Amino acid sequence: MKVMILAGGLSHERDVSIRSGRRVWEALEERGIRATVHDVDTTLLPNLQSLDDAVVWPLLHGASGEDGSLQALLELVDAPFVGTGSREARVAWVKPVAKAVFSRAGVSTPDYVTLPQSLFREVGAEHVLSALLSKFPLPLVVKPARGGSALGVSLVTEADDLAQAMVRCFAYGDQAMIERAVSGTEVAVSVVGHDDQAKVLPAVEIVCDGPYDYDARYNPGRVEYFAPSRLEPAQVAAVEEAALAVHRTMGLRDLSRIDMIVDAAGVAQVIDINVAPGMTETSLFPQAVEASGEELGALYARIVEGAFSR
Amino acid sequence: MTHSDTGGTRLDPWLGSYAARAHNMRASEIRALFAVASRPEVVSLAGGMPFIGGLPLEEIGEMMRRLIVEQGEVALQYGSGQGYEPLREHITEVMALEGIHAHPDDVVVTTGSQQALDLVTKIFINPGDVIVAEAPSYVGALGVFRAHEADVVHVPMDADGLVPEELEKALTQLAAEGRSVKFLYTVPNYHNPGGVTLSMERRPRVLEICQRFGVLVLEDNPYGLLGFDAEPLPALRSMDEEGVIYLGSFSKTFAPGFRVGWAVAPHAVREKLVLASEAAILCPSNASQMAISSYLDHHDWKGQIKKFREQYRERRDAMISALEEFMPDATWNVPDGGFYVWVKLPDGLDAKSMLPRAVTARVAYVPGTAFYYDGTGANYIRLSYCYPTSERIKEGVRRLAGVVDAELETVQIFGKGGTEASSTVEFPSPDLA
């Protein structure tokens, strides 16, 4: 078996993806598993077809890697791959759609509304912004309806800053999700496996000196991580239950990371789901693996073997 | 993974050990977005990469082979800290084209002129010292200045380069405040990113003002020989040997891959530069220096520069023509040489906020904020025409025009731009050179 890691791509998160790919390659090689890292270009399919014992691990973040497109292509050529299938990935990729699906399963998530830029133009931005502010008390969060790594995300604490946040958001896509900001303990819960075999890894608690933005995520120093988290046992149970519920309800496979905030009432509010979680030196999934006591290479080996035998 | 007293980790066990100057060295969102620029699908109008395809690569390959076979024992050995003497002799010939009369002993060879910038800053700047620089200024210089904890005060330029009256005003103000101004950093020819050239009339005036205020001049001149029409103007160094440190480079006139630049400085400064360079790198690469020396010996390097000028002029014309066709609401300068067009976007646009949209549209540029120490310049972008073909330049500008239109629509809908004062200086990377 050989692992073909796909990293890079053309999304805004190319840099993060390349770093993720390198880290997974190292862990697999240390485990004695042959692996290579490839970008997604015109050599992809010929390369795939030349290997009859390969399993693909898509580590592309952002569009085409997480929106189900690449997965659909891999399914088309019957290439075994790590991660969630194309249809489920497509649903998970669009944040408001994902929220609608998992909230029906009883998982809590902050109130939100999703609006396209065209609506602001047609109805008048002033009226829509005013309506938003009357419905969502400050602070609130503006984020692209699709995307990751906190790119284009703003925490709005002053009404005057909302328009600017919308402009920043629409630079990343034509749909904006406006969400009630939740204060509390921020945690990321990673899940491995699927269906009834899905298991949670220890929650990683994130304590940041400001918004957990791109700078905080990829430059060590501003964030203090606790793995496992310092949550009370009942809260641990709540976040694990929420993560498993999301993973199973959304049909996620092999690995995922569910981001949430435990609010003042102790309720786990899910704010994001990731079907291709970051694997860089500062990423949360690898921290959760280490906190579980298992070696990264050992877990990654189990994941690729599972995908290969599927 | 090292854990703190709290039981948590910040994922860097040496966090408490860094020098204060390292705290600003952070990978930015902008840098991450540039990762896409290297993909062939993207038309990159961002980096100042010379058109290496225009070089006689086969001949250079043979030259390199002979260098290693015939002189490998010297080329692959340590060399002089000040630099390979035959190359220093050549460098004096190159500088003579811009009126500088120097002896090879006056020249310090460095690993690109970027290292010379670092060395000069290292030997002159204490934390908080002031460097006066054009507005805007070369991003790579600003990164060095920030790393050495300097404060940069920008002085406006116009179509004739640095404005002497504004320079005098700034130095007067700084003197009144008791600030320690160590040098003026200037790119007098085909400015990066401004594209303008300091006029002949202004050159002595700038030098006179600096002399009067006791301020050294750091003249950074990578593009001086790349003018499209006019003969090179006399370098500032040619007018004031005691008050000017001159930086030169082979990166734009030959190839940046060799990483060879140089400094010419007043003798006492030169001695410190050599010592500082030896402390940093022991010596510049002998192989690179000997290769360039051989190239200058055996190739028609002046003819090659002439070819480069013609190629860059054609690309400049392609860019200007495309801007006129696709972006009539923007304004720009028409450079007479060098690599860059400095574009002012329609009012209300923030080039940094717009960059993700450009990446989506597969075109890249450098936002204006990268060229200001104080985070201003949001309404400007730098476009480079040196690397892509004329056809790609046209396509890139066409895509950029679509990006600008879309961003403008967003800004008009919301009544304000995404402008944010940036408190960070982008650290130099090859993408921003």
Image: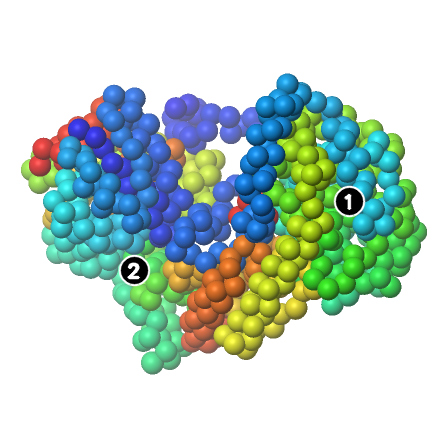
Residue A261 seen in render: no
* Residue B89: % across, % down: 80, 35
Please identify the quadrant where the N terminus of chain A is shown. top left
**Residue flagged by tag 1: what amino acid is it?**
Val
* Residue shown at the point (34%, 63%) measured from the top left: A173
* Residue shown at the point (65%, 33%) measured from the top left: B291
* Residue A124: % across, % down: 37, 80
Q: Is residue A292 left or right of residue B71?
A: left
Labels 2 and 1 positioned on one and the same chain: no
Give the letter of the chain under mark 2: A
- Mark 2 highlights which residue? A145
Residue A178 versus residue B326 in the image, above or below: above
> Mark 2, mark 1: which one is toward the viewer?
1
Q: Is residue B230 left or right of residue B401?
A: right
* Residue shown at the point (74%, 25%) measured from the top left: B81
**Badge 1: few (under 14), some or many (20 or more) residues near its Cα, within 10 Å?**
some
Q: Across the whole image, how many numbered discs are drawn on residues?
A: 2
Residue B318 seen in render: yes
SS at badge 2: loop
**Residue flagged by tag 2: what amino acid is it?**
Ala
SS at badge 1: helix
